[in-house]
C-alpha cells in the first residue's frame, strides 16, 4: 500500500486550488449580494415575489425574472449582467468541480485511477461550462 | 490504492468527533449534492431553452417542490456559512483555539436564517 504523495510546499496545483476555493467562495458572496441589492433598487421590492428575487440573487439570468410582474426589464437584460453571470458560472462551477476532485482524490492513492478521474472531472468541468455559457448567450 | 485504515465502517460510526466532524461530513455531502443539483439545473435549462424538452421541465418542476426547496436551502445555507467559518479560521489561524466554539456560533447564525426560509416556504405552501 502506497499512500498518496503530498505535494511540495509552495506553488502547486493543490495550493492554487486551496486559495481559489476561499477566494471563489467570497466572490460568490459578493456576486449574490450585488445581484440582490441591484434587483431591489431596480424595483424588485414591489414588482416581484420572493422566489423570483432569490432566483435572481443566485444567478442573474433574464429567464429568472421573465415570469414576474416587472414591466420594464431593461435593467435586468444587458451585457453587464451577462458578465456577472459568466463570473458566477466560472467561480461556481470551478468551485464545485474542484470540490468533487478533492473528495474523489481523498479516496485515491497514487494509482493510475487518479489520473483517469482527473481527466474525467476535467471534461465534466469543460462540458458543464460550455453548456452554461451557451444557455447565457442564448437567453 | 486508497490508504489502508484498519477501521470498520461501524467502528467509524462510533468515532466521537463532535461538531467539527459533523460540519466536515455535512460540508462534503452538501457540496457534492449541490454539484449534482447545479449540473442538472444547467442541463434542464439548456434542454428547455433549446428543445422545449419535457425532461427539462420535469426536472425544474421537482426543483419547485417545497420539500426539495427546504432540503436545498438547508444544504446551500449550511455550506455557505460553514465555508465562511473555514475561510475565516484559515485567514486568522490564532482563532483555531476556539474552533469548537466556532461551530456553535455557526449554528447560531444558521438557525435564524433557516428559520426564515422555513417560515417563507411553509407559508407559501400552506397558504396556496
Image (spheres, coloured by chain):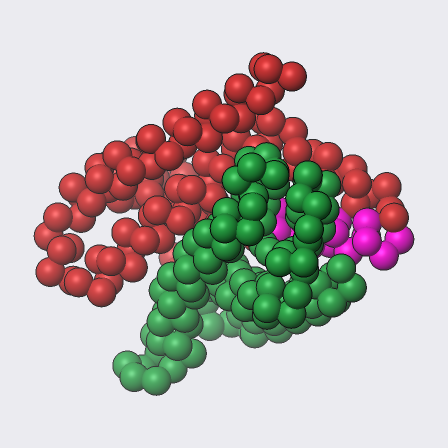
Residue at image position (37%, 34%) is B113
Image location of residue A88, percent across then percent down:
54, 63
Query: Is B43 a magenta residue?
Result: yes
- Nearer to the camera, B6 or A25: A25
Regarding residue B101, the answer to whether it shows in the image is yes
Indicate the quadrant containing the N terminus of chain A: top left, top right, bottom left or bottom right. bottom left
> In the picture, which chain is green?
A
Main secondary structure along the magenta-highlighted residues: helix
Q: Which residues lie in the magenta part?
A: B36-51
Image colour for chain B is red
Residue at image position (29%, 55%) is B86
Image location of residue A48, percent across then percent down:
61, 38
Residue at image position (61%, 39%) is A47
Indicate the quadrant containing the C terminus of chain A: top left, top right, bottom left or bottom right. bottom right
Identity of the residue furthest to the bottom in this view: A11
Q: Is residue B127 left or right of residue B87?
A: right
- Nearer to the camera, B80 or B16: B80
**Eyeballing the image, is A71 above or below B93?**
above
**Eyeballing the image, is B46 above or below B123?**
below
Regarding residue B5, the answer to whether it shows in the image is no
- Nearer to the camera, A74 or A131: A74
Image location of residue A10, percent across then percent down:
29, 84
Q: Is residue A118 left or right of residue B81?
A: right
Image location of residue B14, percent across then percent down:
30, 33
| Residue A52: quarter of image | top right
**Eyeballing the image, is A52 above or below A38?**
above
Q: For the image shown, how many numbered marks are present on the structure?
A: 0
Residue at image position (66%, 65%) is A78
Amino acid at each position: 500500500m502506497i499512500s498518496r504523495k503530498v505535494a511540495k510546499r509552495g506553488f502547486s496545483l493543490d495550493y492554487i486550488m486551496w486559495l481559489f476555493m476561499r477566494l471563489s467562495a467570497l466572490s460568490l458572496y459578493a456576486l449574490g449580494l450585488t445581484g440582490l441589492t441591484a434587483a431591489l433598487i431596480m424595483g424588485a421590492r414591489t414588482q416581484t415575489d420572493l422566489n423570483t428575487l432569490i432566483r435572481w440573487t443566485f444567478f442573474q439570468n433574464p429567464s429568472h425574472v421573465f415570469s414576474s410582474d416587472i414591466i420594464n426589464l431593461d435593467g435586468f437584460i444587458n451585457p453587464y449582467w451577462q458578465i456577472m453571470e459568466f463570473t458566477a458560472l466560472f467561480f461556481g462551477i470551478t468551485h464545485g468541480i474542484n470540490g468533487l476532485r478533492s473528495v474523489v482524490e481523498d479516496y485515491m492513492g497514487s494509482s493510475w485511477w487518479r489520473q483517469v478521474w482527473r481527466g474525467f472531472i476535467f471534461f465534466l468541468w469543460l462540458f458543464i461550462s460550455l453548456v452554461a455559457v451557451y444557455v447565457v448567450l442564448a437567453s | 490504492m486508497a490508504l489502508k485504515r484498519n477501521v470498520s465502517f461501524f467502528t467509524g460510526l462510533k468515532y466521537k468527533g463532535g461538531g467539527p466532524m459533523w460540519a466536515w461530513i455535512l460540508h462534503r455531502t452538501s457540496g457534492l449534492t449541490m454539484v449534482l443539483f447545479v449540473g442538472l439545473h444547467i442541463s434542464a435549462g439548456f434542454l428547455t431553452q433549446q428543445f422545449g424538452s419535457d425532461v427539462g421541465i420535469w426536472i425544474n418542476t421537482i426543483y419547485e417542490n417545497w420539500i426539495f426547496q427546504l432540503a436545498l436551502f438547508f444544504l446551500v445555507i449550511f455550506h455557505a456559512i460553514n465555508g465562511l467559518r473555514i475561510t475565516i479560521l484559515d485567514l486568522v489561524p490564532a482563532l483555531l483555539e476556539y474552533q469548537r466554539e466556532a461551530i456553535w456560533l455557526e449554528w447560531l447564525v444558521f438557525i435564524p436564517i433557516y428559520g426564515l426560509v422555513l417560515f417563507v416556504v411553509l407559508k407559501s405552501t400552506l397558504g396556496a
